[in-house]
Amino acid sequence: MASRPKATILDIAREAGVSKSTVSLVLQGSGLIRPETALRVRKAIEDVGYVYNRGAANLRKAHSNVIGMVINDLTNPFFAEMAVGMERVFQSAGIVPFIANTAENPVRQEEVLKSLMEQGVAGLIVSPARGTTSGAFRRIEMAGLPIVFTMRRLPESRIPVIAPDNHRGAWLATAHLIGKGHRRLVFFGGSSDLVVYHERLGGFREACEALGIAKRDTLVVEGETSRKGGIACLETALAMAEPPTAALCFNDAVAFGVMLALRKRGLEPGADFAVVGFDDVIEAQHYMPALTSVAVDSAGLGERAAHVMLKMIQSRTTRAEDHIGAVNLVVRDSCGPDRRAGMGDAA
Amino acid sequence: MASRPKATILDIAREAGVSKSTVSLVLQGSGLIRPETALRVRKAIEDVGYVYNRGAANLRKAHSNVIGMVINDLTNPFFAEMAVGMERVFQSAGIVPFIANTAENPVRQEEVLKSLMEQGVAGLIVSPARGTTSGAFRRIEMAGLPIVFTMRRLPESRIPVIAPDNHRGAWLATAHLIGKGHRRLVFFGGSSDLVVYHERLGGFREACEALGIAKRDTLVVEGETSRKGGIACLETALAMAEPPTAALCFNDAVAFGVMLALRKRGLEPGADFAVVGFDDVIEAQHYMPALTSVAVDSAGLGERAAHVMLKMIQSRTTRAEDHIGAVNLVVRDSCGPDRRAGMGDAA
DNA sequence: TTGATTTATTGGAACGTTCCATTTATAGGC
DNA sequence: GCCTATAAATGGAACGTTCCAATAAATCAA
């Protein structure tokens, strides 16, 4: 199958006995063309196996119909859910999202962003890789390309962000734990180079303080934001002289790891140690025990991000407001009361 | 920030006091340019905030560095794992994979493929959506664009396929179940419009026959290939007059659903009913009980697909051999012996 | 019939690159 | 000094579209 030289609108024009301009008009669905002519052209298009060259077209009109979605961890189901939400919105607007993975690697991210820009995307939705420097998006901003961040923000950037209310989510979860009688709590996973980490940890700390937990009883163990990280966090915590009885985890993956590690130690998550997650990925409800988690409505955030992007594109601006999505705590079976509570602790 | 008209190589040329040709050469890393000139040009590129226009370039040289990966279900962790494998090999070849989701919808798939082709990708790696018609890829083949299928194949297509050995995997799993003493088995999930379904079901049936299971004792329940589908399958099976004691599931998602439904019924997966999955996604080992599953080496398949694609691109061919990946059964805790076995059944 | 108006169609320039064929500069040999 | 060889830089055509301005054909008013 020798790949013959690609057909162009000129080939179509010849085939249909019209001019290239006419073909172009038909391609764009212009009403100016007589229906029967249009039909003839469409037949020719089919016959020659034509494929539209958007690169050439963009040379003139610079209006691509694709936007790039750049995510830091494709294997986190959270992003898949979010992508699905975005797709719903974009599809009806006739635009196609291309997804690229950075695997949490800033260098890879750089390459991916470059490639996407070169390809002439109309906009970018990005969940920045950890360790992204503030200059990474300068080029994009200079080019006047609409861009929005999801989930994560960069310290001093003014790029609009679509993210859940991390602070409030952590607050709610922590209050729940305290309400169950726990008096020595730990925050598991994440690291301080993530803005999200500070937001969630902040909510945790404030709730502890507001609800009367002593500073020395609010612990923090940093770690990878994965199952593996969760396992490590629990080991660390249980090795303490005075271990905590409940944990708020940076995300669900960490929480799954923690529950796994508890089991391995012969402890029952929920009964022997309370754990709550963050994100509420679908797996959370299917775990054993089902995981109590802060639901962030991933698909909704995806839709929101898509809407904001759409608006930016059509209003030709590069500015937009942040959007903080509502969260709520989904209580399941992973948080029992403190075993040692009721034994006459503080009021 | 008024988006000034985009900078082109002519702007760079003016800025650096050279000709556009020189700039082009520098851009391509040609050694023909004097180092100090190149440096001056590179500085100018930086200064004017230039972004390369690959569309314009492709107009002349038609050598894109992006390939499209089209997948039918982004939320299946299996594909994320596979994508990661692909990315490893593509990255070192300097090519960037863009991922697009079809959500198992042939219409959406059509749009996505069209968009990718228009964008001028160098090749396509596709896991076709269910219900894809055989004509869906005619355009692509006509255009002489390299394309490979992963996981799924189309009935009469001659497009190369990279997939696991479904038949053998099912055979192994079934033999394992029979070895545990089970004598009445069921195949759960999937439907006959999928070639993969026939392959896996075929392995199941042949193993049953070869190992002396009566035809009336080898059951089949079709269903969605998701957790939900698995739940439904189990309900159906348990409602039978003479229910099976073990199930081979179409994939891990179905298996998870089955285990969930068992629990809901007060039955313990493994002890009261044996279940084995297919794919061995990461979650399988973390489930409770850990799921026995047919490992298909998703990342390996991704790498293989990428290699095949690379070779097709550089040899300018559209033909390649199929590749059937090795599988192996990972035995964990979800398959106990038949409770009623040992009570003097057939030899 | 003529001119004006509307409806269909068309040629040509422009978009931002690459690459071939040239030109210009630099160096070496005599 | 001239001639040749090599190195470095350049102009212009081409790629496949869009879109403006212009033309051609059809319709209508008078």
Image: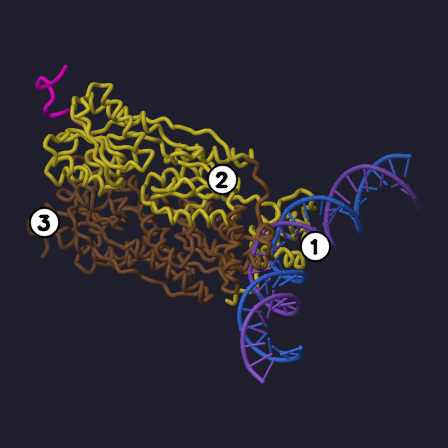
Chain colours: A brown, B yellow, C blue, D purple
**How far apart are labels 3 and 2 at the CA level?**
69 Å
Q: In which quarter of the image is residue D19?
A: bottom right
**How far apart are labels 3 and 1 at the CA level?**
79 Å
Q: Which chain carries label 3?
A: A
The answer to the question of whether label 1 and label 2 lie on touching residues, with beta carbons closer than 8 A, is no
Tell me whether marks 1 and 2 sit on the same chain.
yes
| Residue at image mark 1 | B18
Q: Is mark 2 on a helix, strand or loop?
A: helix
Q: Disc 2 residue type?
A: Glu
Residue drawn at the location 47% of the way across and 41% of the way down: B138
User: Is B109 on the left-hand or right-hand side of B13?
Assistant: left
Q: What element carries label 3?
A: loop
Q: Is residue B62 visible?
A: yes
Badge 3 density bin: few <14, some 14–19, many ≥20, Cα 10 Å = few
Q: Give the range drawn in magenta.
A: B335-347
User: Is D7 on the left-hand or right-hand side of B131?
Assistant: right
- Sequence-wise first label, 1 or 2: 1
Residue drawn at the location 68% of the way across and 49% of the way down: B36
Q: Is mark 1 on a helix, strand or loop?
A: loop
**Residue C5 higher or lower than B255, as above or below:** below
Badge 1 density bin: few <14, some 14–19, many ≥20, Cα 10 Å = some
Q: Disc 1 residue type?
A: Val
Q: Is residue A195 visible?
A: no
Residue farthest top in this picture: B347
- Tag shown at residue A341: 3
Q: Which chain carries label 2?
A: B
| Residue at image mark 2 | B141
Main SS, magenta residues:
loop
**Residue C17 higher or lower than B240, as above or below:** below
